[in-house]
Amino acid sequence: MPEAMGFFTDTTVCIGCKACEVACKEWNQLPAENGGVRELSGDSYDNTRKLDGIHWRHVRFIEQFKGPYDGRWLMMSDVCKHCVQAGCLEVCPTGAIIRTQFDTVVIQSDVCNGCRACIAACPFGVIDINPVSGTAQKCTLCYDRLQVGLEPACSKACPTDSIQFGTIAELRTRAEKRVAQLKSQGVDAQLYGADPKGPLGGLNSFYLLVDKPEVYGLPRHPELPTANLAKSGGLSVASAAVLGLLAIVGLRKRRMDEQSRGGTGNV
Amino acid sequence: MSDTFFSGAPHWTWLIILYFFVGGIAGGASLLAAVVDWFGGPEDRPVVRTGYNVAAVGALVSGALLTVDLGRPLRFWHMLFQSANFPAIMFKGWSPISFGAWGILLFGLFSVLAALGGMAEEGRLHNPALLAVGGAVRGGLAKLVGGVAGLFGVFIAGYTGVLLSVTNRPIWADGPWLGALFAASAVSGPAARGERAVPRATVGVRHQGTGTRAAPARAVSRVARIREPGLGRRVGRGAARGRRGPRDPRAAPATPAATAGGQRRQAGPARRLLVATRHDIRVRGNRALPRNGGDVA
């Protein structure tokens, strides 16, 4: 069995060229949005705005400007995190979402029936419906390319090596070195999702960030959707039991009232 | 900042909202019908039959709504069987949408059986196949089928709330209470409807000298009153009306014609659901009064 593979995205060297977005769309033959007529976002140089069923890569622009001469762009090429404990895979009722031999998470489009449970389950908002197929879709970490020994289209296209592809073990070593280097230069760098003991058992697509995760649109403590299952289920059963019991008690009480009135029930 | 703010909307829009409503009413009606079936008397049979009819129609409509809402409706069975490995069962005990799919299937099966049993009891089935099935569901078996339908009913009512909690969406997943709320709401809605349904439903048996109109519904509406005092009060007025006499004066004479009329009314679970829906909307609308708003208990 092959080693776990994934992405390490060093956001400090991303230049926002969106070559990864284009490479992803080309390789995966994803349709254009809105019939190819792009609507401008109007409040950002980024017009893709979010990951969805036809955008499996998205370069997020975080435009932090206090004045005309004071500010910075943070850029992050976002993608499915291929969580080690994946919420989408957990809830998928058709078995369409699988874990591959590369420890990545893939939606089989011929099995998915478009129920959309995975969309709400993903803590990162990665998945959405592809209107052409009617099924939920997201990054496959180029499962087809991996199987023949090629690297994913996005990392292959990335001109600054902001997206790095490799085995998780190797990428983690590389990422820690890079964080140490940046820290020595006075940059407040941190890794997001690289810790196997962290949330969701670690992310097989992890990031180097220079601001709080929320700034990049990433939850600080992503959770599995089933975290609520036992409590929510228990409370439902309890509430149903109480109401059922009240109905029985009400019915019995009515009987006793009727009996105490001495009638057959005719009022 | 909540960690649920970064997830995406699953586009469960009006079909699913309608399903929540219909499924909740069907589930609650099924539970209450089963409770009255098991713990009520022979004078309560019309309520039981009406409950199972509402449950059966609601279950079928729910299944249709959920199927149509899928991105690929013809693959609905992928939730029940492994598509590449048919007929191996597809079931995840930890995924509400997975066990919910099975729940709806089984709820539909048992509520339809219970409803057919009730219809056979009334002698309303003429199709030989349906009559064979309905006729078989009687006595102890009918009670068992009804009980199972009731249990699945309350499951259907509650699991949808659990399903919403088992996501990463804001509000839905921020607390564990949605399932309990859905279950409570599902039971109280049909309880309120029971109040209305009964005066008409019992017309058929009234002339036999066992008419305790509104009594079982009074019992179940206590549930509603406890949970939602405002709803209960309004429903209480309906009960008072039911106690005094039939709302519809034409239904009062205990002639065979009136009985037949009563039964014909009973014959339409879809209509009853519609009436109930209107009633629920009126009660919950908070502004509108019951039809005879001056009638105070």
Image: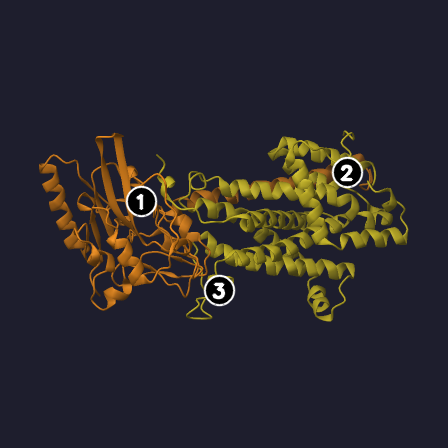
Chain colours: A orange, B yellow
The residue to which callout 3 is attached is B75
Number of numbered markers = 3
Disc 2 is placed on an element classified as helix
User: What chain does badge 3 belong to?
Assistant: B
Disc 1 is placed on an element classified as loop
Among the 4 quarters of the image, the one containing residue A183? top left
User: What chain does badge 1 belong to?
Assistant: A
Q: Position of residue B193 (x, y in %)?
A: 69, 43
Out of B132 and A203, give the one closest to the viewer. Answer: A203
Out of B24 and A187, give the one closest to the viewer. Answer: A187
Q: Nearer the viewer, mark 1 or mark 2?
A: 1
**Residue at image location 69% in from the left, 39% down from the top:** B219
User: In the rendered image of this protein, does residue B279 appear above or below residue B12?
Assistant: above
Q: Position of residue A166 (x, y in %)?
A: 18, 57
Residue A258: assigned label = 2
Out of A53 and A218, give the one closest to the viewer. Answer: A53
The amino acid pointed to by label 1 is: Asp
Decide: few, some or many residues near mark 1? Use Cα within 10 Å; few <14, some 14-19, many ≥20: some
Distance between the alpha carbons at the discs numbered 3 and 1: 36 Å
Residue A46: assigned label = 1
User: What chain does badge 2 belong to?
Assistant: A
Decide: few, some or many residues near mark 3? Use Cα within 10 Å; few <14, some 14-19, many ≥20: some
Q: Is residue A121 left or right of residue A18?
A: right
Among the 4 quarters of the image, the one containing residue A155? bottom left
